[in-house]
Image: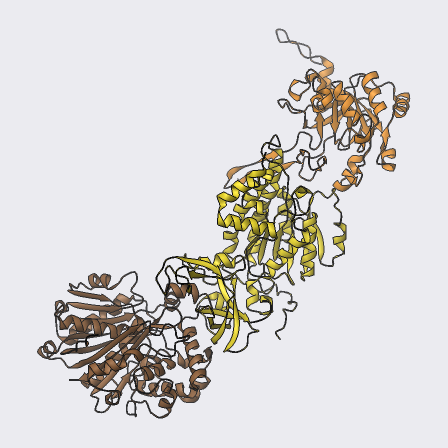
Chain colours: A orange, B brown, C yellow
Amino acid sequence: MNAAKKGEATTPPTDLRAILSGVIGSSGVRLVDLTQTLSPDFPPIVLPPEMGQSRPFRMEEISRYDDRGPGWYWNNVSFGEHTGTHFDAPIHWISGRDRPNNSLDTLPIEHFIAPACVIDCGAEASANADFLLTVGHIAAWEKQHGRIPAGSWVLMRTDWSKRTDPVAYQNLDETGQHTPGPDPDCVRLLVNERDVLGFGTETIGTDAGQAAHFAPPYPCHYYMHGAGKYGLQCLCNLDRLPATGALIVAAPLKILGGSGSPLRVFAIVPASRGSG
Amino acid sequence: MPARAAYDDVVLAVPVTIPYVRYSIKSAHWFLGRAMAELIAAAGIPKARIDGLAVASFTLAPDTAVGLTQHLGLTLRWLEHVPMGGASGIVSIRRAARAVQSADAEIVACIAGDTNHTDSFRRNTASFSQFSQDAVYPYGSAGPNASFAFLTDYYMRTYGAQREDFGKLCVAQRNNALKNPLALLKKPLTLDQYLNARLVADPLRLFDCVMPCAGAEGFLVMRRGTAEHLGLRYARLMGAIERHNAFPDDPVQYRGGWALDNEALYEQAGVGPDDIDFVETYDDYPVINLLQFEGLGFCREGEGTAFIRANTFEATGTFPLNTSGGQLSVGQAGAAGGHLGIIEAIRQLTGETLGARVPNARHGLVSGFGMINYDRGICSGAAVLAAA
Amino acid sequence: MPEPATQPKRKNPVLRTRQPTLPPASRSRVALGLTAAAARGRLELQVCRDCGAVQFPPREVCRTCLSHRLVWRLQDGRGELLTETMLRNAQELFFRERLPWRVGIIHLDAGVNVIAFVHVSVGAAPCRVHIEAALDRAGQAVLIAVPEHGRLDLSQDPKLREMTCDPRSRKILVTDGKSALGQAVVRALAEAGAERIWIGEAERWKKAPGFEALRELPQAMIVPLDVTDGNSVRELAGEIGAKVDILVNTCDCHRTFSIASRRGVETAQLEMDVNYFGLLRLAQEFGPVIKARAADGPTSAVAWVNMLSIFALSNYPTHGTYSASKAAAFSLSQALRAELGQAGVRVINIFPGPIDDEWDQLERPPKLSPSGVASAVVEALKGSVEDVYPGDVAQDWLARHLDNPKGLERELSEGAQ
């Protein structure tokens, strides 16, 4: 806490400086990387073949200290907007297409840092791949941790990111995909009665794998984006976050008219708070 | 058809051999240039007296007789490039004879020669002709060994010739060659060695095949008056024939072009087969000798085997054949293979032999054959020469 | 009765691998007419339109009447073996390394002489034979005399087997073994005696009916392979490339869109990424190591098979972008053929007509079954061809294309929107 020198510009607020200096390895805060590595092996979302396909991540080497470029290494990369750990903007869904500021380049930058409520469904998801988060589960969580604040991320921890085999991660059979997610009532509650910032999952979609059969289909996308709210998918390390108190940094690429993008998403966790 | 003109007064003189070597780093121009130098030295004439030139060579490329003319510093009134392989010698005689007869040229040098690098034979064979490239070489790249194996196999099955018959010719020619200081093959050959040599292309074995080498042969063609004026020994040209692509419908070549023209040859020469004291055949493989015996009237078609069994072929035998050893024992210096017999015939008829001598040689016959363009030799020819 | 090719011994790793050599490749332009026919397994010779004389060797004017109107016509090749030899010496390294060679002169009933290799099962000359055309390791047409009756089986002759790409005892990579066609190819190769079949699988989370049953094949090994991912191709090539004798590229992305019927290029990009760039990635990663083993004993690296489509020959507008991607692959395969041909590895292109699968659902019959196409692949490998047009539709389009390519273009555009 340096006193301002005469004639100099005013120094920033003391608490912010404390946070910033705490980032550099003191016991003030710790950072948790919630992002899967973007690689060609990471499975993309599966759609029926007659539809347009979202591309997996691909790298084509331009040069590697060789005749194509003697002193440098770089790549051309390609991916779908919804490949890997990624952010969904409201424009992604039909219900959100007319919302103001609904594409990546028009989202308010203030939304890129927000608190998170982490709901632990690890045991339930392990027992049942089609596990659905319900209003009952929300009520139980709030009883323990307090009401979900407006403007928070709600992150559904399922430990699904520990399924490193892509076949197990996709979990497809002849009846489609079987991954956990929220049920329609739960989503409506979070949107209408808690005004959350968005919903985040470890699975390949914010909606459950069987959500095509719900009413409405894909309720998390439908209601969240319809209300101008966001999604985060393919997160990891949610088991290292406390139920409350973590601050999520999630800043997607500024793509013109973009519906989503892979991004680096991480949590700032007060060191005094252990994982939930 | 009008009667063919006689070869009045046409003579062949100054037989020259540039010694054969198995491999040489020199080009064909060297061997041909050496032949030309020896010819004018032996004839005692300045180079400028040579006003006609006929050249045969496989390895002169990219040059032809044209390139050689400037290379050797010649100025000529008459020039022939003769790409007919072993028939080039006879054909050169026919062309040069008419040139000197009509005074288009006075002294024509007929030279043939080739170099032989370690890869020459393969390269020459690989690009021998369009038909060979398209339809022969891709089948084992064996070159003339394959072609003559076919002919030999067919002839043996059709006419009952045995390997011993071919061997008899080879042994006799080797005996002739043992006296020839220029022959490359210097060891005696027994019939047993011939029969048991390693297979090359069934039924051909090692001693059925010539040894390709580098070297050159040459002679001069002029009018008799010119030769006498220069004090040169000579042999007289009595008759000559050539024929190309004879019997194209024969399934396999079992007779050569001579069969169509041998009567005209002897009529022009004024002698018959019985008057011939020695024969220099084109002998790149033994079987072709039989086609020449039959085609040139020494025996009937198909009876070559009986003819061999009834004769001996050394220079002092009943039918002196390839008296210097032939290509099979002397070596084949590329296109000079068809000139070898002409040079030997001139030597026998002028009494200037290097080795074995045919007693009382008055008339000799030289035969040429060549150019297996696809599945048969296309070119053939023969000439009757007489002592002065 | 000649012995069938037996299971070869394992290679001695201390010895240097034999380097590839080729038979003489040089041919005049007119002689390439033989190669064009042999590429499709046909014996054709020139026939004079004016006097009817059959010509051989190939030439520019009739050997009988000098007419220049010579046309290539299918021949039955019947004739008589007149004379033969066994070559024990050869000028070219390729032949030298494989002595001896049995060759002969055959007089065809059609009236010309041919020089040909003589199959080991032919009796001594003279005897009746018939002549077949094959491709030698330089990719040029050669003639082979085989017994007058019975089917030609080049694999029975230890010398002539090298003109085939016989899958027996060989190790084969099928790049996509999951599609119906890929599964059929795997099964057909197993039936043909392949020693090992690596079955490429992309997107392991997508299940296909029948795929798991392939694990029961004793020679099968499922490997990850996504030809849209350079890393995946490189890793597999690093792992098995030095063992692959035959690569069968069955990867195919087939969508059924014309230009106007699909907005955006996303689908066309996927077709190109699999059908064209996939081939390019495979060629870059597997090509060099396959070339290096092209003369590596009786189970040398020998062939690269591309599953193209008859649509590659002439665009089928209702599958317009797919056709273009297969045409791109076709063009690239010609470059691949030139490169692999330096080592004598054969590139075989299969151009099937519509296959009875979901993407050709709306095509009217006749359609090919996957097993029918797979049989054509195996037959091509066992024979000596490089351009294969299986099925009635492919044969029909090929005939129309050869006759009048512009006419075919018009006929195919009739169905376009």
- Residue at horizontal 77%, vertical 21%? A224
- Residue at horizontal 34%, vertical 92%? B311
In the image shown, does B2 or B115 lie closer to the viewer? B2
Q: Kindly indicate the quadrant of the structure image that contains residue C346.
A: bottom right
- Residue at horizontal 20%, vertical 88%? B362
Count of marks overlaid on the render: 0
Whether residue C8 is visible here, answered yes or no, is yes
**Residue C167 higher or lower than B49, as above or below:** above
Whether residue A61 is visible here, answered yes or no, is no
Q: Kindly indicate the quadrant of the structure image that contains residue A96.
A: top right
Q: Kindly indicate the quadrant of the structure image that contains residue A13.
A: top right
Q: Quadrant of the C terminus of chain B?
A: bottom left
Residue C212, percent from left and from top: 76, 50
Residue B347, percent from left and from top: 21, 83
Classify residue C259 as left or right of residue B303: right
Residue B111, percent from left and from top: 23, 71
Outermost residue toward the left? B229
Q: Quadrant of the N terminus of chain B?
A: bottom left
In the image shown, does B22 or C138 lie closer to the viewer? C138
In the image shown, does C187 or C107 lie closer to the viewer? C107
Classify residue C286 as left or right of residue B353: right
Residue B301, percent from left and from top: 36, 84
